[in-house]
Amino acid sequence: EAGVVQSPRYKIIEKKQPVAFWCNPISGHNTLYWYLQNLGQGPELLIRYENEEAVDDSQLPKDRFSAERLKGVDSTLKIQPAELGDSAVYLCASSLGNGAGELFFGEGSRLTVL
Amino acid sequence: QKEVEQDPGPLSVPEGAIVSLNCTYSNSAFQYFMWYRQYSRKGPELLMYTYSSGNKEDGRFTAQVDKSSKYISLFIRDSQPSDSATYLCAVTMEYGNKLVFGAGTILRVKS
């Protein structure tokens, strides 16, 4: 069975440009998460979806970040405009929703903003 | 003060050594405790999961939680070069609540 799929794996952009990341969770997983991981740090939650509903987006910087999960399956995270400080790895994870903490992570999208 | 504190290392050990990795947390409301392993340029993968205090063993790995001192540990016996990775502890209050991760400890096992 395929794991969580993310694309692109790597992205280099100039500051003020937009960027989008895509995530396809494990089939049947209702809960989808976007995490931000800075170098040398643990992942930090940006947003959590239960099906198509964003149930926790308190840590998402809404002035420049947006996310959607229109059909309750795959999801897109967008940054517009990107800033130098946005350089990081953006991790997508999914879970069945029937247990605490059993998240399955994708390999991440590594963003470099120049 | 961070909610979860973890020494970033790196921790370098010879093959076959017993490794001890530790985290402390500040909020006594945390009930679920996890250890994730993250290889370079990969996503974290769940190693161990414990509810409340106590020990849990899985092969060469043992997770230990002491809620009275807010201290969680991961022990790796007979460490192998393939264990070289970053180990992240994570805590959460209840199902559906967000995971709070430590910064991760870099482990290097030398052959």
Image (cartoon, grey):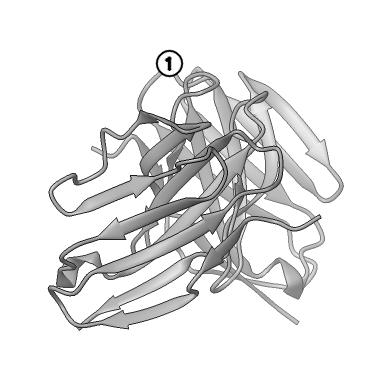
Tell which residue pokes out farthest to the front in this image. Answer: A71
Q: Position of residue B72 (x, y in %)?
A: 55, 35
Could you tell me which quadrant the N terminus of chain B lies in?
Answer: top left
Left or right? Give the position of A114 relative to B67.
left
User: At label 1, which amino acid type do we have?
Assistant: Ala
Rendered view: B2 above or below A9 = above
Taking the spot 26% from the left edge, 43% from the top edge, the residue there is: A60
Q: Position of residue B34 (x, y in %)?
A: 60, 37
Taking the spot 31% from the left edge, 35% from the top edge, the residue there is: A57
Which residue is at the front of the view, A25 or B79? A25
Q: Position of residue B96 (x, y in %)?
A: 51, 23
Taking the spot 45% from the left edge, 68% from the top edge, the residue there is: A109
Could you tell me which quadrant the C terminus of chain B lies in?
Answer: bottom right
Read off the chain for label 1: B
Secondary structure beneath dot 1 equals loop
Residue that numbered label 1 is attached to: B29
Residue A43 visible to an observer of this rendering: no
Which residue is at the front of the view, A6 or B29? A6
Which residue is at the front of the view, B15 or A6? A6
Residue A45, quarter of the rendered image: top left
Taking the spot 41% from the left edge, 50% from the top edge, the residue there is: A35
Instruction: Classify 10 Å Cα crowding around label 1: few (below 14), some (14-19), many (20 and above).
Output: few
Residue B31 visible to an observer of this rendering: yes
